[in-house]
Image (cartoon, rainbow, N blue to C red):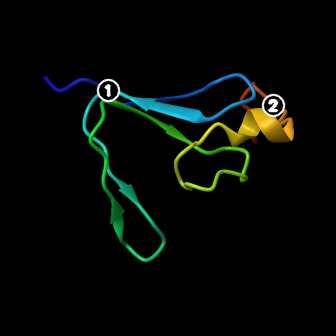
Amino acid sequence: MAEETKISTYKNGPFLVTGGTFRVVDAEGVEFPVDKETIALCRCGASTGKPFCDGTHSKVGFQAAEKAVYEA
């Protein structure tokens, strides 16, 4: 059985995608090459390597809500 893909947040940082098989595709259907078992996706919007995190969140003082908000 394949490992389950998990997306989690890194405190005031990126989304971490781990496990399983996944693809990263842009709005036009172009696939970004992914050759790692874990990737970090930008959550602050300031990365120069979007959609991937380049660490800029720490320079711009990104503050994130860490808890999920569920709509009823």
Expressed as whole percent of the image width and height from the top left, the position of residue 7 reads: 49, 32
How many badges with numbers are in the image?
A: 2
Callout 2 crowding tier (Cα within 10 Å): few <14, some 14–19, many ≥20: few
Question: What label does residue 31 carry, if any?
Answer: none
| Amino acid on which disc 1 is placed | Gly
> Where is residue 12, by image quadrant?
top right
Instruction: Identify the residue at horizontal 30%, vertical 54% (top origin).
Output: 33
Expressed as whole percent of the image width and height from the top left, the position of residue 67 reads: 75, 25
The quadrant of the picture occupied by the C terminus is top right
Q: Secondary structure at mark 2?
A: loop
Can residue 69 be seen in the rendering of this structure? no
Expressed as whole percent of the image width and height from the top left, the position of residue 68 reads: 71, 30
Q: Secondary structure at mark 1?
A: loop
Question: What label does residue 19 carry, if any?
Answer: 1
Which residue is more in the foreground, 31 or 3? 31
Taking the view exactly as shown, the residue that stands out farthest to the left is 1
Disc 1 from disc 2: Cα separation = 24 Å
> Where is residue 71, by image quadrant?
top right
Going by the image, does 52 lie left or right of 70? left
Going by the image, does 1 lie left or right of 49? left
Answer above or below: position of 43 versus 51: above
Can residue 31 be seen in the rendering of this structure? yes
Marks 1,2: beta carbons within 8 A: no
The quadrant of the picture occupied by the N terminus is top left
Q: Which residue is mark 2?
A: 65
Callout 1 crowding tier (Cα within 10 Å): few <14, some 14–19, many ≥20: some
Instruction: Identify the residue at horizontal 52%, vertical 47% (top origin).
Output: 52
| Amino acid on which disc 2 is placed | Ala
Counting residues from the start of the chain, the first of labels 1 and 2 encountered is 1
Instruction: Identify the residue at horizontal 57%, vertical 35% (top origin).
Output: 15
Instruction: Identify the residue at horizontal 65%, vertical 36% (top origin).
Output: 55
Going by the image, does 2 lie left or right of 25? left
